[in-house]
Image (tube, rainbow, N blue to C red):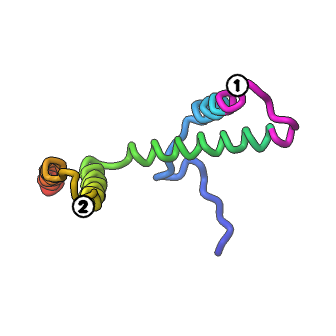
Amino acid sequence: MPNTSIPATAEGMPKFNRVAIMTLAWKLYRRDWVNCRPASAEARRKSFSRCLKSAWMTAKFEAETARKTIKQRAADRVEELTHELMRIDARPWKMTTVTDRRAIQAEIQALRTTTLQ
């Protein structure tokens, strides 16, 4: 595999607000250590590293969610509702499932009509 680097301004690469990511990382770090501090410098670095990693994951998830089209969001929702129908089937016998099942099926049908248009 060639060792080529991709420039940060490459087409299709999302732009991230690094200031907001660092701010979120510090906010998470302060939230985790509000009443006490890590014992050593190494523990502080590991803790902040974890918070920074979490902030980057959040930013990437939000960017991915923003890129989704309406049809993709509807398809994701249909998948979630299908899983919910399976959970309803696993309920005990004495629990009523008819109204929940009908509501979920109606929502799935409405979403499928919007994705087909």
Percent of width and height locating residue 11: 48, 52
Label 2 vs label 1: CA separation? 44 Å
**Residue where numbered disc 2 is placed:** 89
Taking the image as shown, residue 63 lies to the left or right of residue 9, namely left
Is disc 2 in contact with disc 1, using a CB cutoff of under 8 Å?
no
* Residue type at tag 2: Asp
Under tag 1, what secondary structure?
loop
**Residue where numbered disc 1 is placed:** 34
Which residue occupies the extreme bottom position in the image? 1
Residue found 68% across the figure and 68% down from its top: 3
Taking the image as shown, residue 96 lies to the left or right of residue 3, namely left
Q: Which residues are magenta?
A: 29-43
Q: Nearer the viewer, residue 11 or 41?
A: 41
Label 2 Cα crowd, 10 Å radius (few <14 / some 14-19 / many 20+): few
Residue found 46% across the figure and 42% down from its top: 62
Is tag 2's residue or tag 1's residue first in the polypeptide sequence?
A: 1
Q: Quadrant of residue 30?
A: top right
In the rendered image, residue 32 lying in the magenta stretch gets the answer yes
Which residue occupies the extreme top position in the image? 35
Residue found 30% across the figure and 54% down from its top: 80
* Residue type at tag 1: Val
Q: Nearer the viewer, residue 101 or 66?
A: 101
Under tag 2, what secondary structure?
helix
Q: Specify the quadrant that holds the N terminus.
A: bottom right
Percent of width and height locating residue 83: 30, 58
Q: Nearer the viewer, residue 66 or 79?
A: 79
Percent of width and height locating residue 82: 25, 59
In the rendered image, residue 31 lying in the magenta stretch gets the answer yes
> Nearer the observer, disc 2 or disc 1?
2
